[in-house]
Image (cartoon, helix red, strand yellow):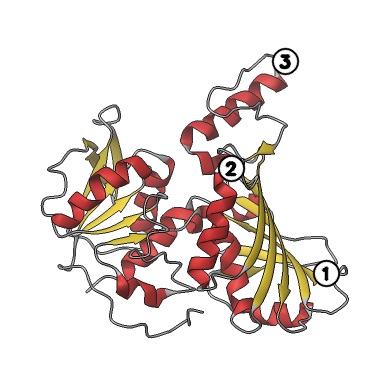
Amino acid sequence: MPSPSTNPRQAPRLRRSPPVVAIIGATGAVGRELLGVLERREFPLAELRLYASQRSAGTVLPFRGNDITVAALNDSTFAGVDLALFSAGAKTARQYAPAAVRHGAVVIDNSSAFRMDPAVPLVVPEINPDEIARHSGIIANPNCAAIIALLPLWPLHRRNPIRRAIIATYQAASGAGATAMAELREATRAVLEGRAYPPRVLPHPYAFNLFSHDTPVDPATGYNDEETKVINEARKIFGAPELRIGVTCIRVPVLRAHAMALTIECEHPITADQARAFLSDAPGLRLVDDAERNRFPMPSEATGQDEVLVGRIRQDLSDPSGRSLALFVAGDQLLKGAALNAVQIAERLLP
């Protein structure tokens, strides 16, 4: 398994400090969060360039007290760019990421385009930072559900290897982008006013409803694409190709922040108190586990927070061996599940 390190190997760095940074897909939900995270974390940069589709070109976005006009993405976009943060989908990443690398930029891509490429590191900095050193120009940001699920499982796995995990996700509108978030708002308003609202972005009525994640289902396995991503990416990030893992991904009418129920079986017996001790000081996590007041992780409290909230930690009573635990987590899909994770990777690339 990958080993955490406070002093990871010297990764191939950005060629200049401060770097010229480009955000591809700047007008989308994750692109806008990237702007906010770069500003809040005072990421050093010489220049910030914003790009999107022709349809969104001309949009003006604020950054550090200035307004930046979004330009249309094209083949000459990457001249002089040192770091390219992609949040524009797999098709765009496949078309333009190699061009960015040819111009000398390091690409951190938020899409699924390169995640399972053996030559591309798939990185959660709190778990496998040493993988950044393997990059040859492209580093993949994992699936949002995978990041939020694996961050609380890693401190347990490194002390008592997880042999099996069953995960049920309750995924917010933010995972489907700004248009899905708008649809949830509009559909909810329509239902409360007694008006019909036919779904336009998602395949089913969204307000006061939940449904299986809206990605294609593999007829051979019965798993949809989102579930398969979590399975495959968990194995790659943990360096555990034999990890037994089952996932059910559900879209719920929550505007932002995913929640998940996790049940794990470890190699050796483990108690809830041991798990709390392992999780209480783990990076990127906040323990929310107050049984007396029935207060556990909630999307409303995870929204806008960098940390993934973890709690409801208890023994799995269906396993008499004492090797299994159940947990509940919530994390902001747009932050740690996407933009924040990408910027944390970028910070490790600074000269």
Q: CA distance from mark 2 to mark 3?
A: 37 Å
Left or right: where 159 falls relative to 147: right
Q: In the rendered image, which residue does mark 1 sit on?
A: 316
Q: In the rendered image, which residue does mark 3 sit on?
A: 194
Q: CA distance from mark 1 to mark 3?
A: 43 Å
Q: In the rendered image, which residue does mark 2 sit on?
A: 218
User: For this rendering, which residue is in front, 149 or 222?
Assistant: 222
* Amino acid identity at mark 3: Gly
Outermost residue toward the front?
Answer: 220
Look at the image and tell me whether residue 291 can be seen.
yes
Looking at the image, tell me whether mark 2 or mark 3 is earlier in sequence order: 3
Q: Is residue 153 above or below residue 201?
A: below
- On the image, the x and y values in percent for residue 229 come to 53, 53
Looking at the image, tell me whether mark 1 or mark 3 is earlier in sequence order: 3
- On the image, the x and y values in percent for residue 84 come to 25, 54
Residue at the (53%, 44%) spot, across then down: 175
Looking at the image, tell me whether mark 1 or mark 2 is earlier in sequence order: 2
Badge 1 local density, few (<14 within 10 Å), some, or many (20+)?
A: some
- On the image, the x and y values in percent for residue 226 come to 56, 47
The quadrant in which residue 129 appears is bottom left
Badge 2 local density, few (<14 within 10 Å), some, or many (20+)?
A: few
* Amino acid identity at mark 2: Asp
